[in-house]
Amino acid sequence: KAGVTQTPRYLIKTRGQQVTLSCSPISGHRSVSWYQQTPGQGLQFLFEYFSETQRNKGNFPGRFSGRQFSNSRSEMNVSTLELGDSALYLCASSLDRGYNEQFFGPGTRLTVL
Amino acid sequence: EDQVTQSPEALRLQEGESSSLNCSYTVSGLRGLFWYRQDPGKGPEFLFTLYSAGEEKEKERLKATLTKKESFLHITAPKPEDSATYLCAVSPRDSNYQLIWGAGTKLIIKP
């Protein structure tokens, strides 16, 4: 069974630009969560999507947004990039909202110059 | 406030030297506690889920245990390939399924 896939794996952007990251969950998994990971802050929860609806949202500004499609694939978007947005962005999928075991993708490394 | 604290922040061991990592938590009610392993630049890899005090899970050289206040990840006779950051997360009963993550313990096993 294929794991969680994320594209692209690496991105370099400049301040003010916007970026879209993509996540394909494990087949059959319906819940997708996004996290930001930086050396100083650890894993920070961004949002969770289930059945194409945002179910939870972390403490991030409105520049961070996401969506989920009917096939459970998810995208997250960051507009007006700032230097502090440089991080590893991780996507995790779980079977259903009642199953908390989350399985992570390899991440997208975003560098903002 | 729900909180998860992992200790120590970093641990250096010689190959074969057994030890334990700690994850202490403060939540109103526990739905589950999870252990993950993360290698540098990669996504966390799921290891164990524990649901109730007294429960234990084992996988190769790793054994996870749970009490009402904390969980331990015991590493027996570790090898250099066990070097990684170990993350703990809890799912509070009233959290709408959102996990609360610890900062992790960086484990280094020297040959």
Image: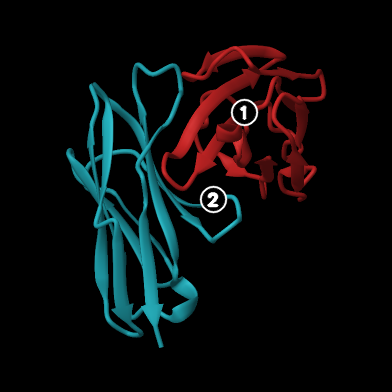
Q: Could you tell me residue B69's position as x and y percent?
A: 17, 39
- Residue A35, placed above or below residue A40: above
Q: Nearer the viewer, residue A30 or B88?
A: B88
| Chain A image colour | red
Looking at the figure, which quarter contains the C terminus of chain B? bottom left
Secondary structure of the residue carrying tag 2 is: loop
Q: Residue at x 75, y 48 (%)?
A: A10
Q: Chain of mark 1?
A: A
Q: Secondary structure at mark 1?
A: loop
Which chain is cyan in the rendering? Answer: B
Identified at 35% across, 42% down, the residue is: B102
Do marks 1 and 2 share a chain?
Answer: no
The CA distance from mark 1 to mark 2 is 26 Å
Q: Amino acid at mark 1?
A: Glu
Provide the residue designation for mark 1: A82
Give the letter of the chain under mark 2.
B
Name the kind of residue labelled 2 in the image: Pro
Crowding near the residue tagged with mark 2, few <14, some 14–19, many ≥20 C-alpha atoms within 10 Å? many
Q: Residues within 10 Å of mark 1 (few under 14, many from 20)?
A: some
**Residue farthest to the bottom?**
B111
Residue at the disc numbered 2: B44
**What number of labels is visible?**
2
Pick the residue in front: A26 or A5: A5
